[in-house]
Structure formats: structure tokens, C-alpha cells
Image (spheres, rainbow, N blue to C red):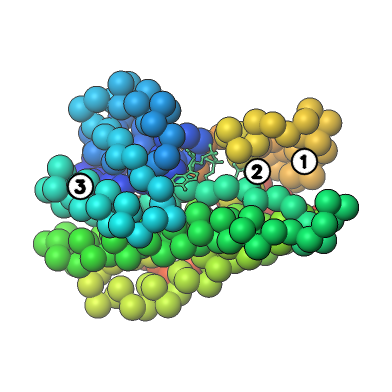
Amino acid sequence: MSFKNSLAVISGGASGLGLSVAKRIASQGGKAAILDVNEEQGAKAVAEHSNNIIFIKTDISQEDQVDSAVDQAAAKFGHINLAVGCAGILGAGRLISKKGPMALDYFQKVVDINLIGSFLLTRAAARHMQTNTPVNDQRGVIIHTASIAAYEGQLGQVAYSATKSAIVGMMLPLAREFAQFGIRCMAIAPGTFETQMMAGVPEEIRTKLCAEIPFPSRFGYADEFAQMVEQINDNQMLNGSVIRLDGAARLQ
Ligand SMILES: NC(=O)c1ccc[n+]([C@@H]2O[C@H](COP(=O)([O-])OP(=O)(O)OC[C@H]3O[C@@H](n4cnc5c(N)ncnc54)[C@H](O)[C@@H]3O)[C@@H](O)[C@H]2O)c1
């Protein structure tokens, strides 16, 4: 199934990695619904690709909003056959810092957006996909964004790494469960990518981070992530696992 035939819902699609997936789908003639809290950037994406991209304001951590957004996208496109989870926040901080212990609310917010949001998107998308008419025995593809911090969480990444390794943990049971419907489930674990999330990184830290990436010694481009999503969507043997996209970087 190529992007040309994709009818996608993309959480966090108003910016960075998710936006580049939406644009890649749109540029090939497929359709994408951006589910994001950022209305301004969502409107910009729609203005650039008005025939192929729609924006549905959605807080990915809210059950009713996610169910309703995926229902709206399916109604608009006829059905959906691809879901890409890119909504996420960094949630940096030590459990015990000079400012005191990490607030439960803070930890909870990272879990709600990064993990519960992934669960809600998966559930809403699979509920629709299971009734699709199969194409080459397949009814849909679900792709989530983990991080290499799932494996090598750095100091100050306890909340973020917890959510990203939980996404890794969900892939195999989801693939096993959805096999009966012909729905595949995969995740990508990016290294460091050039997006809004990394925009605030000071120059000296950026230089250090790049030097630690064996090859290519640079941040990844968002379109390289979108290309990976396209390849997973195309290749039916990819199921139930996680692909590192990191230039051989291993976080210290
Ligand atoms: N950029 C990197 O280096 C990198 C590396 C590894 C993993 N990731 C992961 O990739 C994903 C995309 O990150 P990005 O780099 O494109 O960042 P980004 O900040 O450019 O995009 C994230 C998007 O998520 C949206 N979002 C945040 N909270 C939301 C919510 N509650 N509901 C709906 N949307 C919400 C934001 O509005 C934004 O549009 C994230 O899950 C991130 O953890 C990024």
C-alpha cells in the first residue's frame, strides 16, 4: 500500500516529524488528518495542501477528543488505513533536583501525552481499520514514535524514557492481537532530529550531540523520518517491532 492510497490520521502532525509525514503523504496524493493542539501550525499545513490535509484540533491525551477526531477523519475520507503517532513532549527533569522532588502532575502529564495518547490513537484507529475491506490481506498500519531514549535514557529523562520504552513494549502484543484483522503495528525509535523539539538546544550541546553520532554526524532531517514511515507502510513483513533511526548513535 503506497502513500498515494493512504488515508491517514497523524497525531502531533502540526509540527516536526508528524508534519513531514503529512506532507509526504499529501505530495503523493494521499490524505492526512492532523490531530494536534497547535491550531496555528495546523492551519498553515492545511493552507499549503488544502486538497489533501485536514486539521482536527485534538488533545491526544483526552479519550473523547481522540475518538471523535478519528471518527471525523474516517467520515471525511471514507475510511482510514494508516495511523501515525507523533504527538509527544520531552518532559525533562530529575526525580530529585535542587528545586525539590518532581511533581506527580508533571510526570503524569508526560505519561498522558506520550503513552496514554499512543494507546488512545491505536485503539481509535484499530476500531475503524478492523472493518476495512482488506487490500492484499491488510486492513491497516499503525506506526508510533518511540525514541532511542527508550533504550539509553539519559540523566533527566526518567519520565520521557519511561513513556518511550512503554511504546516499545506495546508493539509485539499489539501486532499479535491485530494479526487477526490484518493490521500491522510498528514503532520508530529516532535518534536526534531537526525539529521544533530540538530547536532550543544550545549550539555547544548541539555540536557535542552531533559529534557523538558515528555517521552521519548530524541531526536527522524530518523527511528522513517520513521516508521511514513510508517504507514501513509499504513493506508488509515489518510488524511488531521497533526500528532505530539514529546514525548508530548510542546515548551516554
Ligand atoms: N526530534 C527528535 O530528536 C526526536 C527524537 C526521538 C523521538 N522524538 C519523538 O518524535 C515525536 C515528534 O516530535 P518532534 O520532534 O516532531 O517534535 P515537535 O515538537 O516538532 O512536534 C510535536 C507535536 O506534538 C504536538 N503535541 C504536543 N502535545 C500534544 C497533545 N497533548 N495533543 C496533541 N498534540 C500534541 C505539538 O503541538 C507538536 O505539533 C515525539 O513523540 C518525540 O518524542 C523526537
- Residue position for label 3: 72
Label 2 C-beta lies within 8 Å of the nearest ligand 1 atom: yes
Q: Are marks 3 and 1 in contact (CB under 8 Å)?
A: no
Q: CA distance from mark 1 to mark 2?
A: 8 Å
Q: Tag 2: residue type?
A: Thr
Q: Secondary structure at mark 2?
A: loop
Mark 1 close to ligand 1, CB under 8 Å: no
Chain-order first, disc 2 or disc 3 = 3
Kindly identify which residue carries mark 1.
209
| Element assignment for label 3 | helix
* Mark 1, secondary structure of its residue: helix
Query: Which residue shows up at 75% across the image and 38% down it?
Result: 210
Q: Residues within 10 Å of mark 2 (few under 14, many from 20)?
A: many
Residue flagged by tag 3: what amino acid is it?
Gln
Between 250 and 85, which is closer to the camera in this rendering?
A: 85
Residue nearer the viewer, 205 or 62? 62
Drawn side of residue 150 relative to residue 4, left or right: right
Q: Is residue 138 visible?
A: no
Q: Find the distance from the CA under tag 2 to the CA under tag 3.
A: 33 Å
First in residue order: circle 1 vs circle 2: 2
Left or right of 142 in this view: 16: right
From the viewer's perspective, is 134 left or right of 110?
left
Category of crowding for the residue at label 3, using alpha-carbon neighbours closer than 10 angstroms: few (below 14), some (14–19), many (at least 20): some
Which quadrant is the C terminus positioned in? Answer: bottom right
Q: Which residue is mark 2?
A: 192
Q: Earlier in the sequence, mark 3 or mark 1?
A: 3
- Find the residue positioned furthest to the right: 98
